[in-house]
Image (tube, grey):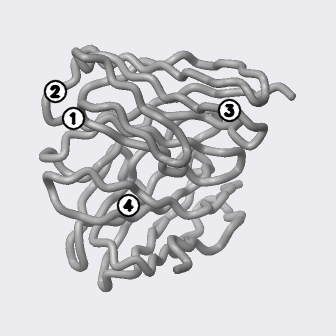
Amino acid sequence: DAKTTQPNSMESNEEEPVHLPCNHSTISGTDYIHWYRQLPSQGPEYVIHGLTSNVNNRMASLAIAEDRKSSTLILHRATLRDAAVYYCILRDVWAGQNFVFGPGTRLSVLP
Amino acid sequence: NAGVTQTPKFQVLKTGQSMTLQCAQDMNHEYMSWYRQDPGMGLRLIHYSVGAGITDQGEVPNGYNVSRSTTEDFPLRLLSAAPSQTSVYFCASKRGGNGRAYEQYFGPGTRLTVT
């Protein structure tokens, strides 16, 4: 699987937007970009995924660069509950079923 | 739906003991997997299964066994516990099928300490 690079940590103020970046310069044409997050003392939970076009759901938006070498997870209004580790994962849909989790970005939300 | 359930939530073992971590899902998912997460690290895949009767090794399989006799259950067996297996263990499930990007659902985890 292609590798991803994320900042180790980020901070945000409550009720402000948060942009979490992910670089994936070796992404292949069949790699989907997945985002998961892990709240303290919980299992990871799905946030969003996409292939080429920007995606929106009730939790977040995913903005994918035109060359697909980077993407950004956008939380429109951070809440204290959004403090978590966010993982950006590439997954080739034709190469099996496994997800490879890196260290992710630890997001702190300040009141 | 209960989703993915794991038991026990906490366990302390002595070196050399064996035990089984239980995992069940009620979403009729074909794919199930076990991960371990050491402090401050991301998750690492131990074993996975793409359907009943089919299992395969992940990144860190040594010291663990799995079997998948039903779609719902995927137990993880520690054969002879070692302190290096102190970790938090997560079970996950997802719909199968190549060519599609399905989300994974994770259980709440089992925190295991080996002394």
Mark 1 — on which chain does it sit? A
Q: Label 2: which residue?
A: A28
| Residue A45 vertical placement versus B25 (above, below) | above
Q: Secondary structure at mark 4?
A: strand
Q: Position of residue B73 (x, y in %)?
A: 41, 80
- How far apart marks 2 and 3 lie (CA) works out to 32 Å
- How far apart marks 3 and 1 lie (CA) works out to 28 Å
Q: Position of residue A23 (x, y in %)?
A: 37, 16
Mark 4 — on which chain does it sit? B
Q: Nearer the viewer, residue B55 or A93?
A: A93
Circle 3: residue type: Arg
Residue B93 is labelled as none
Discs 2 and 3 lie in a common subunit: yes
Q: Label 1: which residue?
A: A31
Q: Secondary structure at mark 3?
A: loop
Circle 4: residue type: Ser
Q: Nearer the viewer, residue A17 or B107?
A: A17
Cβ–Cβ under 8 Å for marks 1 and 2:
yes
Q: Secondary structure at mark 2?
A: loop
Q: Who comes first in sequence, dot 3 or dot 1?
A: 1
Circle 2: residue type: Ser
Q: Label 4: which residue?
A: B33
Q: Label 3: which residue?
A: A77
Q: Secondary structure at mark 1?
A: strand
Mark 2 — on which chain does it sit? A
